[in-house]
Amino acid sequence: MQRVAIVSVVTILTSALGRWPDAAVAWNTGRMYGTPMRARLTDVAVWRNRAYACWPRTDASQPVTLLELPWPETDDEQSLQWKPRRPFHADQQKLYDCSSVQSAISVDLDKFRGHLYVLDGGYDNCQPKVIVYDLKTYKYIQSVELGGLNGSGLTTLVVDARPFKAEMRVYVGDTHSGRIVVLDPDRNIWYMVALHAQNYGGAVIQDYRRPEVNQEVTAECIAVSKLHSSVYLTSMRSHDLYTASFKDLRNITSYVTPSVKDGDVLPVGLRVRWEGVKLGVSSGLYADIQGGLNYVYTRDFVAVRLSLIAGGAPVTAENHKVLLQSYDLLPAVTKIFTDNTNYLQVWALNAVPNSKNRHLVKINTLTL
């Protein structure tokens, strides 16, 4: 296999002399929401011709946190005349109104029902919670408080719709080691599943020794591959990559006794396997429909796709394919995702507009 070739970050920075724009052309939050502040987007989900993006609140002067935006991100006349719908207006996101969204951190979709799930980190005295909107009727339908969790540590939300079993689970990642937070919206409860790291052996890869058996795994970033029935776990501050069985996670969270209360840790944990190390500190962990694991190696502004067989040989650089490397186009990636047309177009979301005046850039097109 060909070894991954990544250009030095010094070369990239030298070639990027221009200053990024303060606002994107199409996703101009100043025009749409009347705020002069530059939005910093952390997550996005696409539903038909609309995108729902998170802009976590940094202070009380920020008027909105959950944005409804046109999809795709183009600067045509229709996009320039865009108006968000009522549930996503600023007056529906009032600060200190704990029934409203306070600080949107992450979003995901139940595509079967057309429901948008929003991870709200809370603000001041308002507790973290998960809010659900029906995108067919554009109405708020549910809110489940995550009382006791530290909202500043919450990072991601993954919806696991199980239509054949009429079940729904939502997995919440945070910076706290050793657990996944699980929400059961049907029962309005949340609990935790402990992560138990397994030994790999004596392998040494890129000067990184395997973690010890009892090392706590951080589920700060969560990606699910239904093709490989795997859950991928990592931290944005760590090189280590872990996997777990998606089937095991579903089984553990399907048979929860009625006695379980909010915040309880289930008696049965999830076995997690260390798979090796990434190229480095990363962002935007995403598993595409063909089983590839995508992320951005943030130091060198490079989007890569990792071919990984859980339980196989440890991950090395040779397992990676470079999709795009550009300081201009990938200045601050926070999310990798696909649109909902055919799930073959893979996009990267930048927190701020890139040199092309856009938050988004296509990094790959999968082929059938």
Image (cartoon, grey):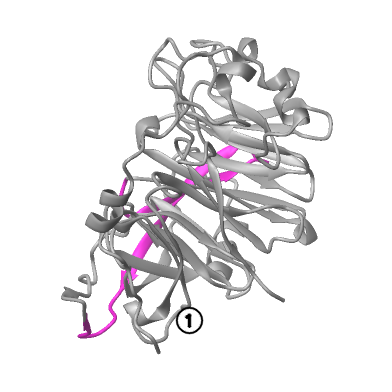
Judge whether 66 appears above or below 175 on screen: above
Query: What range of the chain is rendered magenta?
Result: 176-204
Left or right position of 11 against 361: left
What amino acid type is highlighted by mark number 1? Ile
**SS class, disc 1:** loop
Left or right position of 164 against 151: right
In the image shown, does 146 or 14 lie closer to the viewer? Answer: 14
Residue at 43% x, 49% y is 330
The answer to whether residue 268 is visible is no
Image quarter in which the N terminus is found:
bottom left
**Quarter holding residue 342:** bottom right
In the image shown, does 69 or 105 lie closer to the viewer? Answer: 69
Residue 159 painted magenta: no
Residue at 64% x, 68% y is 289
Judge whether 311 appears above or below 51 on screen: below
In the image shown, does 48 or 229 lie closer to the viewer? Answer: 48
Image quarter in which the C terminus is found:
bottom right
Judged from this view, the residue extending furthest toward the right is: 137
Left or right position of 361 against 321: right
Judge whether 291 appears above or below 269 on screen: below
* Residue holding disc 1: 309
In the image shown, does 364 or 357 lie closer to the viewer? Answer: 357
**Quarter holding residue 247:** bottom right
| Residue 54 on image: x %, y % | 53, 33
Residue 177 painted magenta: yes
